[in-house]
Image (cartoon, rainbow, N blue to C red):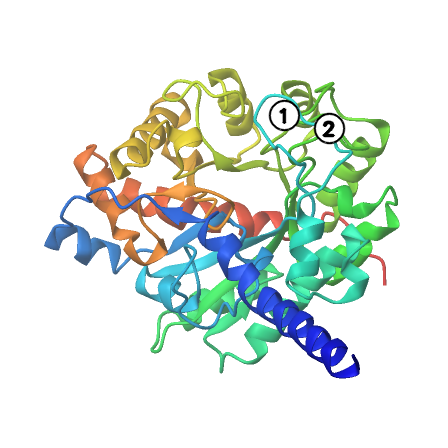
Amino acid sequence: MRRWLTAILLVVALAAIAFFLAAPGVIERGTNQIDGKPLPTVSERAKALHATLTIVDLHSDTLLWKRSILDRADRGHMDLPRLEDGNVALQVLASTTKSPKGQNYDANSGDTDNITSLVIAQLQPVRTWTSLLERSLWHATKLHRAAAASDGKLRAVATAADLDALLAARRGKPLATGAMLSIEGLHPLEGRLANLDKLYAAGFRMAGLTHFFDNDLAGSMHGLKKGGLTPFGRQVVTAMEAKGMVVDIAHCSNACVADILNMARRPVVSSHGGVQATCKVNRNLSDEQIRGVAATGGLVGIGYWDAAICDTSPASIAKAMKHVRDLVGIQHVALGSDYDGATTVRFDTSKLAQVTQALIDAGFSDDEIRAAMGGNAVRVLSAGLVPLTPPAP
């Protein structure tokens, strides 16, 4: 009997080990996909231009997954080798901490969470199993550890001086790649403004107020009530602008967007999404909202997945970017891939020259392409990372 019990326990232990080793990869392979449809040929002109660009992507969720950002992966959309292949100068990495079960674009409650099971399956530190704040702090730790182990190839960017140093380093060889931390919904504050200081100290420099559900800061476009900013949300926006944290309206309800645009003293961004004019999905921006973002001096980051552009083709990305350019000017156009964010796309970041080619095909000039692919983002981030008031000691 004892031998049988020992054998059963051994089988259970081996099964558990196999699960924890395999589950994260299996989940990601089924979540972050490339659709495999044909891609256009990239011309020699596009390749040459692409090699000279300073490219910034305003949104990726790669830190959510259990794999090293330093190593080339056989799953997902992004890692350092593929960023280097795509000539990306700066990647904004979001911390996603909570996602409702049955998630959809129309109406979600915040009562359930898919990410808790992923956190446990990935054997993250126990403190992250129950605390959203600790999940974000863990994502920051992952980035800083990767940067420290990268031999200078990956640099964490948290100040305008960091960004200047990164761009200076990219004028030499080998090229360095920068990463800046963002947050997808500020529910990790856990209702306490003081936690914004903890996130800032960890290196977070951009944040959206909401994700797929209403929270205590604001209504989500995908929430149940879809309200505007709460008094707490207004406090947080004011504090973010003072600290030098860029305010992101992605996923905000219409009322939330209007409230942020009305009170903004600094440029705001829509880090990842699309525009209603080319893809009528509720989370995409109306022309009025695009004008509002532009009035702050901000950016509209165009995503690569079907709900952002109603397709996954490079031409559809360029079409959305062209609409923003024609409506408010090229200075407000940016990239916001949403790579590794439970999205299906046409190409990973190593093939980012596809966007350069699509912009050429859409009639963009070389200077417009430089601006849209990253020049605009460098301008807005350089200004937005400077505190309005000195942070507390």
Which residue is label 1 attached to?
A: 222
**Which residue lies at the image location 79% right of the left edge and 31% below the top edge?**
234
Amino acid type of the residue tagged 1 in the rendering = His
Q: Nearer the viewer, residue 375 or 228?
A: 228
**Which residue lies at the image location 52% right of the left edge and 53% below the top edge?**
27
**Which residue lies at the image location 40% right of the left edge and 42% below the top edge?**
344
Q: Can you give x and y, in whole percent of width and height, for residue 303 in the image?
A: 42, 38
Residue 130 seen in render: yes
Q: Nearer the viewer, residue 241 or 131?
A: 131
Q: Nearer the viewer, residue 3 or 163?
A: 3
Q: Residues within 10 Å of mark 2 (few under 14, many from 20)?
A: some
Which residue is label 2 attached to?
A: 109
Q: Quadrant of the C terminus?
A: bottom right
Q: Is residue 224 above or below residue 329?
A: above
Q: Can you give x and y, in whole percent of width and height, for residue 117 in the image?
A: 69, 52
Q: Quadrant of the N terminus?
A: bottom right
Q: Residues within 10 Å of mark 1 (few under 14, many from 20)?
A: many
Q: If you read the primary sequence from the N terminus, does the residue marked by circle 2 or circle 1 appear first?
A: 2
Q: Can you give x and y, in whole percent of width and height, for residue 162 in the image?
A: 56, 66
- The answer to whether 77 appears left or right of 222 in the picture is left
- The answer to whether 225 appears left or right of 180 in the picture is right
Tally the numbered discs: 2
Amino acid type of the residue tagged 2 in the rendering = Ser
Q: Is residue 175 above or below residue 262?
A: below
Q: Secondary structure at mark 1?
A: loop
**Which residue lies at the image location 38% right of the left edge and 69% below the top edge?**
81
